[in-house]
Image (cartoon, rainbow, N blue to C red):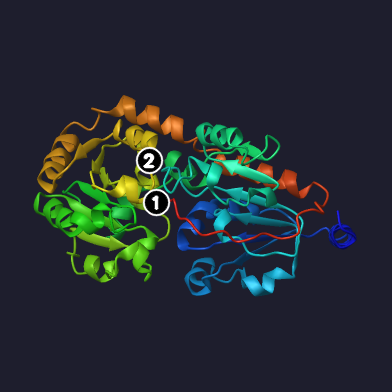
Amino acid sequence: MSVTRKLTRIAHATDHALGRLSPQRRVLVEMRTPVYHAVLGPVCDALRSLPNLVLHYTSEYPDRIRPLIGGSRFVTHREAEWSRYDLYLNADPWAAARLRRCAHRINFFHGVAGKYDLDSPGGLPMGFEYYDRVAFINEDRLRRYLAARVVTASQAVLVGYPKLDRLASGKVDGSAVRESLGLTARRPTVLYAPTYSPASSLHGAGEQIVRELDAAGFNVIVKLHDRSLDPDPRYTGNVDWRARMQALEVPGRISYVEAPDACPYLAAADIMVTDHSSVGFEFLVLDRPLLVFDAPGLIEAARINPQKVTLLRSAARVASTVDELVAAAKEETASPARLSVERRRVAGEVFYQPGGATERAVALIRGVLSEGSRPHAIGAHKPEPVAEGGS
């Protein structure tokens, strides 16, 4: 080891030893896009009640995040780089801020759909060597990452998915959500939540799906992945999906929504339509009918783990045309318990003990904050971003 690097490590350790003389602990939360607010928001809410802990937020997209955190302290990546933090929380290792004076880091996953090779991480530039702990949503992915030696046994922690705790515990009032959207009470409600990709069902048949479900007597809530609203043509195919979906709105029957957290809309839905997304798996926690619209080319385009495709479809009805989809929606609404055993099995496999993940996450954070400084954690590189999660 070079003399310069040794001195840098000593300086880093000294800096944080001095910082720990104060009883106050400073935590920086990365919120790259609005969906990460949904993923980390429950943890942040719980952390605010802890004494002597101050939360700051950062993002490479400040204009998207500032409205979500209200009056909370926001710092830019540039401002954060040389500030001292006791802990950095992130839900996307590809979007890490470069932090020169950060003692500890924890990564939380933001989805379970197995897209973009995240279930086969051996060749991905993950950057997990910079994290003290990696909080896993389920045992399957934890085992995959250990086997690929992407993380070590001392890093890997089985936490679950804090985003789902309130939904799984029945604390989201679906009827109140429908009422807030002005939806007609006498019609069953469908949530349409496709993934982002020019190969998704949104591009192939999204508008027709919404119109035909409405014509068949369903309320329709349209919740797009936040990447479908990104101007980058890689995600949108140069289509203004916000304008397209807003044009379909019908008061009392079709509602287009953009809140970062899909959970209220999951609770409001009697049935859900997706192609392949994390929110499709999330809906299974409610044990309500799920429909998958087959989008040719999506599996290859989004590099989805074929095992996850099979797993999701094992608990859902699959339709290849809009007519098939509408017919399946009617049948599943009439017999909602038909695939209940399969739905509960898949939900139990994909989400570790939903309802208690936030408590486990906070316990993990408190444990890391109680550790001494970690002088080899100098900074994080920024590999190419990937977005796995659903809406």
**Residue at (77% x, 56% y) in the render:** 103
Location of the C terminus by quadrant is: bottom left
| Kind of residue at disc 1 | Gly
Q: Residues within 10 Å of mark 2 (few under 14, many from 20)?
A: many
Label at residue 281: 2
Q: Position of residue 167 (x, y in %)?
A: 43, 44
**In the figure, is residue 33 to the left or right of 23?**
left
Label at residue 73: none
**In the figure, is residue 24 to the left or right of 28?**
right
Q: Confirm or deny contact between disc 1 and disc 2 (CB under 8 A).
A: yes
- Above or below residue 226? Residue 348 is above
- Which residue is situated farthest in the front direction here? 2
Determine if residue 81 is in view.
Answer: yes
Total label count? 2
Q: Earlier in the sequence, mark 1 or mark 2?
A: 2
| Kind of residue at disc 2 | Phe
**In the figure, is residue 264 to the left or right of 54?**
left
Q: Circle 1 — which element?
A: loop
Determine if residue 183 is in view.
Answer: no
Q: Residues within 10 Å of mark 1 (few under 14, many from 20)?
A: many
Q: Which residue is mark 1?
A: 390
Between 78 and 178, the one lying in front of the other is 78
**Residue at (45% x, 35% y) in the render:** 350
- Which residue is situated farthest in the top direction here? 341
Q: CA distance from mark 1 to mark 2?
A: 9 Å
**Residue at (67% x, 37% y) in the render:** 152
- Above or below residue 246? Residue 212 is above
Q: Circle 2 — which element?
A: helix
Q: Position of residue 205 (x, y in %)?
A: 18, 55
**Residue at (67% x, 42% y) in the render:** 363
Q: Position of residue 262 (x, y in %)?
A: 38, 53
Q: Position of residue 312 (x, y in %)?
A: 34, 36
